[in-house]
Image: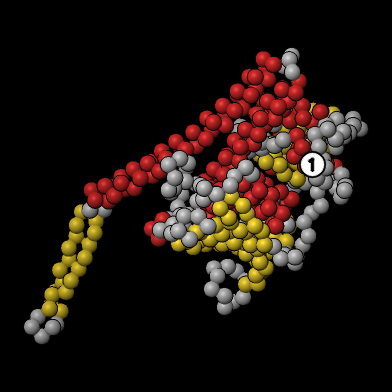
């Protein structure tokens, strides 16, 4: 196959009449191949930058996890308080690893937000305070008392806030002040904003840092682009991806020596946030029989141990067919399961979606909780329309598991 370019021009006589035409065909196959190779090389170079940054971050995280866990092994018979502290440090490192993976998934495939009504002012304050703890940067908050609730994925928007605040903190290495402001916005037809009509919340994050030149400003949301010596340059690209997936938009203005302002818009809602029991803890005892289906033996065994620690009786199976058979048998024996926890993806076996369909055929009232390590799977964002009563993204902690199970077994419990 060859790539051919062509052009043509008329031949005119003295009176300006067309008496012929000149057609030129050029074989540009080599040029096209060279251009494709340049593009491919640039992509590979970008992937190299990304892989280097990610590998560095993961190695630090894994060092903390493995180091603390190995220390737990050798000191288990010694000081219980020291063991508890090391376990806590290992858990915190694992949470950082989880957040990093979710950022990659969000950027790589545009993780579908699992939306719900949320108090965005609380999310902003908690996220920003977490990032700024121990720094020389002070943040002031300006939220109207009648601020609407936001229709958002709270975890993803928290990620946006953290990335923007990290950016502001790094722009003020000697310390300084920043502010975050929220406002209710009603988008009309004649508004210039690239948004659909409706209600929005505008969030403005402003710092007094070094600012950015125009050439940097034009590339600030590009993946892999960074002005820092370390890091993978994904933070602001991820912010852009998340806000876009929420049906909003994000903009930036900056002036060298005067600071930078990021502004983003997310949908507002008149609904109030769902009341979830914040007091659910790993130590809260529960009763009931739970069927766990997970093809990964390590993940399944970990889930089983957590549920048993919470007080549940647990049966663990490896794929959907066995789960359906066990569920049917338990109903016939008059000892039904209170809840079924299924993994969404089972390579070479029956996964969570088909398992849920068959369980619903057996028992239309079956309580089914779906879990997955693919946080970008659209089923997690729309789990009810796929026959599930709840969804939980892996990896999860025992408190998150306890809360998800309780919401299904005891809906409306304060």
137 and 10: which one is in front?
137
The location of residue 303, given as percent across then percent down, is 74, 30
Relative placement, left or right, of 262 versus 311 is left
Residue that numbered label 1 is attached to: 403
The residue depicted at 13 percent of the width and 75 percent of the height is: 11
Looking at the picture, the colour scheme in use is: secondary structure
Give the vertical position of 113 relative to 145 (above or below).
above
The residue depicted at 44 percent of the width and 47 percent of the height is: 226
Relative placement, left or right, of 369 versus 59 is right
The residue depicted at 61 percent of the width and 58 percent of the height is: 179
The location of residue 304, given as percent across then percent down, is 76, 28
The location of residue 94, given as percent across then percent down, is 63, 33
The residue depicted at 73 percent of the width and 57 percent of the height is: 119
The location of residue 389, given as percent across then percent down, is 77, 46
In the displayed image of the protein, which residue is found farthest to the bottom? 15
* Label 1: element kind: helix
Q: Quadrant of residue 322?
A: top right
- For the residue carrying disc 1, how many other residues have a C-alpha within 10 Å: few (<14), some (14-19), or many (20+)? some
Relative placement, left or right, of 358 versus 160 is right
Q: Quadrant of residue 294?
A: top right
Relative placement, left or right, of 181 versus 231 is right
Residue 374 at least partly seen? no
Residue 145 at least partly seen? yes
In the displayed image of the protein, which residue is found farthest to the right? 334
Give the vertical position of 116 relative to 79 (above or below).
below
* Numbered-mark total: 1
């Amino acid at each position: 196959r060859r790539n051919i370019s062509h052009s043509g021009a008329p031949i005119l006589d003295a009176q300006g009449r067309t008496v012929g035409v000149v057609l030129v065909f050029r074989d540009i196959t080599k040029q096209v191949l060279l251009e494709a190779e340049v593009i491919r090389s640039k992509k590979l170079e970008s992937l190299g930058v990304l892989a280097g940054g990610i590998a560095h971050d993961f190695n630090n995280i894994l060092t903390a996890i493995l180091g603390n866990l190995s220390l737990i092994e050798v000191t288990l018979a010694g000081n219980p308080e020291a063991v508890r502290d090391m376990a806590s440090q290992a858990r915190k490192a694992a949470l950082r690893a989880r957040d990093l993976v979710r950022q990659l998934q969000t950027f790589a495939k545009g993780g579908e937000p699992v939306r719900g009504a949320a108090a965005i002012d609380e999310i902003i304050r908690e996220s920003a305070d977490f990032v700024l703890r121990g720094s020389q940067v002070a943040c002031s908050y300006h939220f109207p008392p009648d601020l609407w609730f936001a229709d958002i994925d709270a975890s993803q928007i928290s990620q946006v806030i953290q990335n923007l605040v990290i950016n502001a903190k790094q722009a003020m290495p000697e310390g300084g002040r920043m502010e975050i402001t929220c406002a209710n916005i009603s988008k009309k037809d004649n508004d210039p904003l690239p948004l659909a009509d409706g209600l929005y919340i505008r969030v403005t994050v402003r710092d007094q840092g070094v600012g950015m030149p125009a050439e940097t400003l034009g590339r600030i949301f590009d993946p892999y682009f960074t002005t820092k010596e370390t890091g993978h340059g994904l933070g602001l690209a991820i912010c852009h991806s998340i806000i876009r997936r929420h049906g909003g938009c994000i903009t930036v203005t900056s002036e060298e020596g005067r600071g930078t302002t990021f502004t983003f818009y997310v949908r507002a809602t008149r609904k109030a946030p769902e009341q979830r029991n914040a007091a659910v803890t790993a130590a809260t005892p529960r009763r009931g029989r739970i069927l766990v289906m997970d093809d990964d033996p390590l993940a399944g065994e970990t889930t089983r141990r957590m549920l048993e620690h919470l007080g549940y009786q647990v049966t663990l199976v490896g794929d959907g067919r066995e789960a359906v058979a066990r569920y049917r048998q338990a109903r016939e024996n008059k000892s039904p399961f209170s809840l079924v926890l299924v993994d969404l993806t089972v390579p070479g076996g029956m996964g969570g979606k088909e398992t849920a369909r068959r369980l619903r055929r057996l028992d239309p009232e079956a309580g089914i909780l779906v879990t997955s390590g693919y946080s970008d799977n659209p089923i997690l964002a729309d789990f009810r329309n796929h026959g599930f009563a709840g969804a939980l993204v892996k990896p999860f902690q025992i408190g998150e598991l306890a809360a998800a199970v309780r919401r299904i077994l005891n809906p409306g419990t304060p």
